[in-house]
Amino acid sequence: MTTIYFIRHAEPDFNIHDDFSRPLTEKGQTNCALVTKFLRDKNIDAVLSSPYLRARDTVAPFAESTGLEIRTIGDFRERKVDDEWILSFEDFTKKQWADFTYKLPNGESLEEVRVRNISALEGVLREFSGKTLAIGTHGTALSVIAHHYDNTYGYEGFAEMKRIFSWVLKMEFSGNGDFVGMKKIDLFRADR
């Protein structure tokens, strides 16, 4: 059994519009302790991450506490919306979830994000078969991964999750890489 804990990044500083270098807020940095505490007893074999700063910084305290190196995987990066910052993000995301091929002129569709992330995940499943992993990721990227394995996970699931920093999706796969199941984990709830 391969177990993956996808960790959606902690609260980012939306005043920084550069997607690659957007840091965590002070609150986000503090909440990384919840991620570390949650992962501590999970027997994590490797820590992987999107190359984006907020995703790496969310799993970095855990990696440092265990002596594990963070391996960056470029295809786990977040969706590119466009070259410009958009103000009507909710309208845009609703259009994308209604039509997986919809995109802005210089952005990515959800289908492109899905193909890229699933390809990266399949590579990880081959390389780390039978291991337990933590992967620092993003809201949209994680949502399309969830949708790939459970098509009932749609815009409503994304909208619920996008308000929670950090959010965890535990996914399990058989030894040959077949999907077994997933569980959503809200680190802020005592009953997790």
Image (cartoon, helix red, strand yellow):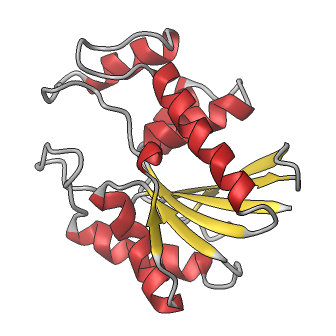
* Residue 150 at x, y percent in the picture: 74, 31
Q: In the picture shown, does residue 146 fall above or below 11?
A: above
| Image quadrant where one finds the C terminus | bottom right
Is residue 170 in view from this perspective? Answer: no
Is residue 54 in view from this perspective? Answer: yes
Q: Residue drawn 37% across and 33% down?
A: 79
| Image quadrant where one finds the N terminus | bottom right
Q: Residue drawn 38% across and 59% down?
A: 55
Among the 4 quarters of the image, the one containing residue 91: top left
* Residue 27 at x, y percent in the picture: 27, 69
Between 139 and 70, the one lying in front of the other is 70
Q: Residue drawn 82% across and 66% down?
A: 130
On screen, residue 140 versus residue 89, left or right, reads right
Q: Residue drawn 38% across and 41% down?
A: 78
* Residue 13 at x, y percent in the picture: 19, 55
Q: In the picture shown, does residue 50 fall above or below 58?
A: above
Between 154 and 190, the one lying in front of the other is 154
On screen, residue 24 versus residue 128, left or right, reads left
Q: In the picture shown, does residue 171 fall above or below 33?
A: above
